[in-house]
Structure formats: structure tokens, C-alpha cells
């Protein structure tokens, strides 16, 4: 039986994708990290306020007939390597995703608080949701999300009646 070999382009890709193990070898103590040398994670601004707003928006949309969940796509700090690891899902996906139960339309709200702004990927994702007929908005307050959702709901009811 012939030995299987990977094509060169796949072999190169696999070697580049392989990350070193973060676990210490058996029977040895890992070196103690020097606290002064490790980069510290950056604190994000207004995380508690943003989390509260996200929860409130999710609850509001649930009361308005949506099945909604929080989609966490943030980078996570890994102290073993002293850096952030990128999120595993597609860049730009909204903080809250779901669907409107009566019609099945997708619902996406990108929660922003204070001076936070949409990234190009987030803006592009919201535009794609709107183009598909779903509800998409940049959520800065409960009142704004409720107002925009009500307008969207009326527009789909009008379109279905026509």
C-alpha cells in the first residue's frame, strides 16, 4: 500500500496553523511567570453598562415576540501566551442574534454604549441582514431599539398585506 503524503500547499498550511502546546511537559514545573514582563489585558470601557444594556435589549426583544440570544465574539485573553486569542466566529456578527417567531425573520442588534462605534464588518453584517428582510440596528438605548423594531414590524406587515 502506498504511503499517503499531503500536497505541498496543504502541508505548508498545516505547519503554519499548528500552535505550540500551552501545557508544560510531564514531570516538570512550568516556569513562574514574571508579572512585570507579561502584557496585561486592556480593560474595556463601560463593560458593566454595555452588559446591562445588552441584557435589557435581549429581554425587550423577547417580550416583543423574538427568540434572542447573546452572541459573544470577543477576543479572550490567554495568560499562558500573554496575548488575546481571536474569537472563533465570523467577524462582525452582532452581539444579539435571533429571529422573530411569527415570521422567522432574522433579528440582529449590535449593542453600542457611549462613544463606541460600529466596525466596518459590523456595519456590513447589519446591511446584509436588512437586505435579507430581517431586523438589524445599532442598539444605543431601549427606546431606540423598540422604536426601530416597531417600525420594522409594521413594514413587514404592510409588505405581507400587499
Image (cartoon, rainbow, N blue to C red):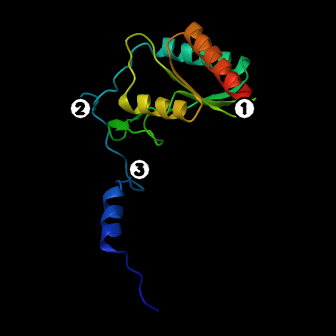
- Label ID, residue 23: 3
Q: How busy is the neighbourhood of tag 2: few (under 14 within 10 Å), some, or many (20 plus)?
A: few
Number of numbered tags placed on the structure image: 3
Q: Is residue 79 above or below residue 14?
A: above
Where is residue 83? Give x, y as percent: 33, 36
Q: Residue at x 30, y 72 (%)?
A: 8
Q: Is residue 13 above or below residue 7?
A: above
Q: Is residue 100 above or below residue 45?
A: below
35 on left or right of 96: left
SS of the residue under disc 3:
loop
Q: Residue at x 56, y 36 (%)?
A: 132
- Label ID, residue 43: none
Question: What residue would you read off at disc 2?
Answer: 37
Depth order, front residue of 103/85: 103
Q: Nearer the viewer, mark 3 or mark 1?
A: 1
Marks 2 & 3, CB-CB < 8 Å contact: no
162 on left or right of 42: right
> In 3D space, how far apart are the residues under numbered discs 2 and 1 (Cα atoms)?
54 Å
Where is residue 109? Give x, y as percent: 54, 24
Closer to the chain start, of discs 2 and 1, is 2
SS of the residue under disc 1:
loop
Question: What residue would you read off at disc 1?
Answer: 103
Where is residue 88? Give x, y as percent: 46, 43
Amino acid at each position: 500500500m502506498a504511503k499517503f503524503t499531503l500536497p505541498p500547499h496543504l502541508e505548508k498550511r498545516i505547519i503554519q496553523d499548528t500552535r505550540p502546546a500551552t501545557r508544560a511537559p510531564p514531570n516538570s514545573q512550568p516556569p513562574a511567570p514574571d508579572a512585570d514582563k507579561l502584557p496585561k489585558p486592556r480593560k474595556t470601557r463601560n463593560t458593566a453598562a454595555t452588559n446591562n444594556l445588552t441584557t435589557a435589549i435581549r429581554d425587550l426583544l423577547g417580550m416583543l415576540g423574538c427568540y434572542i440570544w447573546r452572541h459573544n465574539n470577543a477576543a479572550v485573553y490567554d495568560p499562558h501566551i500573554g496575548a488575546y486569542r481571536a474569537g472563533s466566529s465570523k467577524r462582525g456578527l452582532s452581539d444579539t442574534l435571533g429571529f422573530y417567531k411569527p415570521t422567522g425573520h432574522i433579528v440582529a442588534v449590535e449593542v453600542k454604549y457611549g462613544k463606541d462605534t460600529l466596525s466596518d464588518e459590523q456595519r456590513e453584517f447589519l446591511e446584509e441582514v436588512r437586505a435579507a428582510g430581517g431586523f438589524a440596528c445599532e442598539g444605543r438605548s431601549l427606546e431606540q431599539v423598540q422604536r426601530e423594531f416597531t417600525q420594522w414590524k409594521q413594514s413587514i406587515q404592510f409588505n405581507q398585506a400587499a
